[in-house]
Amino acid sequence: MKTHTPTNESGLAGVDLSRRSFLRYAGAGAAAVTAVIAIESCKKNHDVKRVDVGSGDVGILNYAYALEQLEAAFYTKVVASPYLGMSSDELSLLTDIRDHEVAHREFFKAALAGNAIKGLTLDFSSINFSDRGSVLAAAKSFEDLGVSAYNGAGAMITTPDYLVLAGKIVSVEARHAALIRDLIQFNTFVDASVVDINNTSTEYSKSPKEVIPIANRYLYPESQISFSSIGAY
Amino acid sequence: MNLLNLIEDINNADPEFQDRISPRRDAIKNITSFGSKVAIAALPFAFATLFKKAYGATATTDVNSVLNFALTAEYLESSFYNTYTAKSYIPANDAPGLAIIKTDENNHVKFLKSVLGSNAIASPTFDFSGGSGSGNGPFAGVETSYDTFLALAEAFEDTGVRAYKGQATHLMGNATVLTAALNIHSVEARHASHLRRLRQLRGVMVKSWITGVTSGISISAAAAVYAGEDNTTQANVNIASFVSANAATEAFDEPLTKDQVVAILSLFIKS
């Protein structure tokens, strides 16, 4: 791309050219692209019947609803069967977080109404609920994943009110993530695994394509989700 | 309809068009994503969507002014931590976390300045007593008191979270800038959570999340930072019908308008 010689005074000719060549390519390669996609979706849909979140803003909201179902179910179980040695401070904090996640889940369910996906069946068999380390590690994964998922989906939202709502929720997820991390090891509320600390100090966001396969590890086969309209399974 | 000519025409009419539909990568990604689903026959439609996204919500709002507004808040935070984390009152156990926050805020300043280029505003000078330059405002204790430092840090971080949240819709249509702003927003929330935890561990009645309009800060000037945080209704859904009223307020952080944030920041700006 850099090899193109800028041809206008904005200095952006290289950008311009690359877009033009893409458009030309896209037109010429239409048949091939369509064929590849058809094969790919056939293969993926064949494996298992997924719960599709839908398309557009409804798809994003259902995607968020699925993640909140996961978190709410997790903390409900954590509080119902506390790990060995859970302090009263930790019980109080984890109960608060449970309530926040339940609030998020029920909010999305009510807001989506008839467009809501079904209640998902969770598979937490990989988590040892009697062990503090196992529970907090899972909590950290879920919270960090939630933050990166909301951040990565924000620009896909087309309705301003929904973007604001996602913003209202993601900062609470980030508060959770930081607190859980501080419970695991103090002063790790931000680290290089989630934030670009040596450069911009911006959080690493994740696209639905990156998030959905991770979330599906905690869902029973018939509850695993897809966002087929954007090719995420 | 010749899209290639159209792009050129728009470029001539609007030199900032490239910026509006930036980033190039996302523009291309959008087109490929559309292409894979609706086939290339619908490319004019895909282009129209891209065009609408580029101009839709940002038509009347200058993205640079949003970024300079964010930069002002980051200047305040970075200057604050640069000044006060050097104080001898910082406990050794807390110093590593505060150093992380200081680094993050300085990185945010650098990042926003690099995005804004020559459009970046210069840093104001600050009065961290909250006296608008008098040096004798309600937070003057920050010079000698670690607890006042933490209270102020909490208020600044919570303000930052609310400020970014309030500007998000003005960045719709510029996926790169919006995503970057969201990726800063969540880092500010992580900072706020940690600072609140530090205070909680020192016996202050405060949690990592915001309960109603409470902050554990007794200085009345802080109240503006938390105005409206006691909201329990989201998109006409009564959240308090699912969980306690306190949890309903904690579960959602509320935005502040630019005017509200400016009013808060003005206490701390000398010139």
Image (spheres, rainbow, N blue to C red):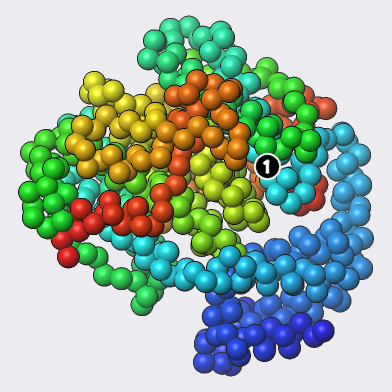
Q: On the rendered structure, is A106 left or right of B138?
A: right
Tag 1 residue = A61
Identify the residue at horizontal 39%, vertical 30% (top origin). B212
Q: Is residue B157 at all visible to an observer of this figure?
A: no
Three-letter code, disc 1: Leu
Circle 1 SS class? helix
- Residue B59 position, x and y percent, is 56, 72
Identify the residue at horizontal 92%, vertical 68% (top origin). A31
Count of marks placed on residues: 1
- Residue A218 position, x and y percent, is 69, 26
Residue A53 or residue A50, whichever sits in front: A53
Identify the residue at horizontal 50%, vertical 20% (top origin). B244
- Residue B264 position, x and y percent, is 27, 51
Q: On the rendered structure, is A21 left or right of B106?
A: right
Q: Is residue B7 at all visible to an observer of this figure?
A: yes
Q: Is residue A176 above or below residue A206?
A: above
Residue A131 or residue B160, whichever sits in front: B160
Q: On the rendered structure, is A2 left or right of A222?
A: left
Residue B249 or residue A36, whichever sits in front: B249
Q: In the picture, residue A69 is in which quadrant?
A: top right
Badge 1 density bin: few <14, some 14–19, many ≥20, Cα 10 Å: many
Residue B32 or residue B169, whichever sits in front: B169
Identify the residue at horizontal 41%, vertical 49% (top origin). B256
Q: In the picture, residue B153 is in which quadrant?
A: top left
Label 1: chain letter: A
Q: Which quadrant: the C terminus of chain A? A: top right
